[in-house]
């Protein structure tokens, strides 16, 4: 009740960056909802910005897609896996380093203020920055699963295929299938993208491996609902950073948080449906660096090895 009154009173005022700094300083259980905007400075494009992946897929149309969403659509993937694997190396996270925004999350955790980071990102950079209390709502490349027999393998097993733009097939399915007679030399395909189908014979029953990232048409990882219902009871601040909040159900974190909890949006573009109390528009890295400077926090050193 106290919180509700406080927020109603504050809503009468004009909230400023100073309020944001005060809220971050005083809060102890911060939920941070992040998206692709915290990784653009690392060199990974987001989806919906002017120079994002959707714009690139639309403009270049090198994959002949009717709609850029198809690149991450599970039904399309199962029928045309070579399209995703011709492209996946561009977003494969092995060579990227965390941004100041990722390190800000690590800092909140170090200060014992981070209740949880709900990230929609699949690049794993929160963990690389040392953040432990992170839920990768849309999964990651750290494991891969056979779409047919559901055998799970470490992501490293398909890394070479991703980087060479080849479709990885399931070894377990190939072992289980009866041997089949040798084919004559495969004909080269005329398609624009490189397909391994033209390079080598696929296994008898080609079962495709898929990285454990959530495609459109797939459900979220199982922990999401449980953790969110616990966190909504404890959270005292919601920070939304670098997301257009267009992808449900993660976008619903905002509406599921009790109204008493103040919400701060840090983003390049305004997101009206986040209904934020404080909007800090601009580059996330610059804004979080400014906040840290004002509070007197310095970024922790990067961990030497990857936790978890
Ligand atoms: P989005 O819809 O592309 O929105 C990104 C938002 O970030 C936009 O509102 C931008 O204005 C904003 N933004 C971009 N750069 C910055 C910046 N430097 N500072 C502040 N704000 C910035 O992406 P969402 O994350 O909202 O959509 C969820 C999708 C995107 C998830 O399914 C992800 O898997 C997917 N995705 C992830 C990555 C990644 O892991 N790095 C990259 C591309 C897409």
Image (cartoon, grey):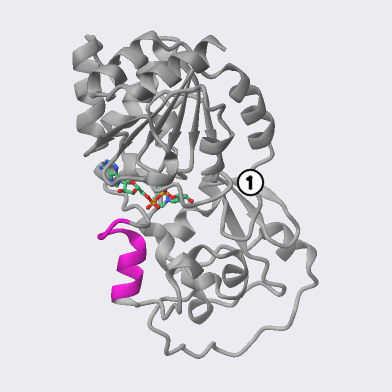
Q: What secondary structure prevails in the magenta region? A: helix
Q: How many labels does the image show?
A: 1
The residue lying toward the viewer, choosing from 273 and 119, is 273
The residue lying toward the viewer, choosing from 308 and 245, is 245
Where is the N terminus found, in terms of image quarters?
Answer: top right
> To which residue does mark 1 refer?
220
In the image, is residue 58 part of the stretch drawn in magenta? yes
Q: Residue at x 69, y 30 (%)?
A: 226
The residue lying toward the viewer, choosing from 15 and 153, is 15
Give percent across and percent down for residue 233: 62, 20
Left or right: where 199 falls relative to 217: left
Give percent across and percent down for residue 45: 31, 53
The residue lying toward the viewer, choosing from 96 and 199, is 96
Residues in magenta? 49-59
Q: Which residue is drawn at 53% across and 27% down?
A: 259
Give percent across and percent down for residue 182: 67, 83
Q: Which residue is drawn at 47% across and 66% down?
A: 69
Q: Which residue is drawn at 63% across and 46% down?
A: 220
């Amino acid at each position: 009740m106290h919180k509700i009154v406080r927020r109603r009173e504050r809503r009468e005022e004009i909230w400023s960056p100073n309020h944001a700094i005060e809220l971050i300083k005083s809060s102890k259980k911060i939920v941070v909802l992040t998206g692709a905007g915290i990784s653009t400075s690392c060199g990974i494009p987001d989806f919906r910005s002017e120079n994002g992946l959707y714009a690139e897929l639309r403009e270049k149309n090198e994959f002949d897609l009717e709609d850029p969403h198809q690149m991450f659509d599970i039904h399309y993937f199962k029928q045309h896996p070579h399209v995703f694997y011709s492209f996946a190396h561009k977003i494969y996270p092995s060579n990227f380093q965390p941004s100041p925004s990722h390190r800000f999350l690590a800092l909140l955790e170090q200060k014992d203020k981070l209740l949880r980071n709900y990230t929609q990102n699949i690049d794993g950079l929160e963990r690389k920055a040392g953040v432990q209390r992170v839920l990768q709502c849309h999964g990651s490349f750290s494991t891969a699963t056979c779409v047919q027999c559901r055998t799970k393998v470490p992501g490293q097993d398909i890394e070479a295929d991703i980087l060479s733009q080849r479709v990885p097939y399931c070894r377990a399915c190939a072992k289980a299938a009866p041997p089949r007679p040798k084919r004559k030399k495969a004909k080269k395909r005329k398609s624009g993208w490189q397909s391994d189908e033209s390079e080598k014979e696929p296994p008898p029953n080609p079962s495709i491996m898929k990285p454990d990232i959530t495609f459109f048409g797939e459900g979220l990882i199982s922990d999401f609902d449980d953790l969110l219902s616990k966190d909504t009871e404890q959270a005292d601040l919601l920070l939304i950073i670098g997301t257009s909040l267009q992808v449900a159900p993660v976008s619903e974190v905002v509406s599921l948080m009790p109204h008493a909890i103040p919400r701060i949006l840090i983003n390049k573009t305004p997101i009206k449906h986040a209904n934020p109390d404080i909007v800090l528009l601009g580059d996330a890295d610059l804004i979080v660096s400014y906040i840290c400077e004002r509070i007197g926090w310095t970024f922790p050193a990067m961990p030497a090895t990857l936790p978890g």
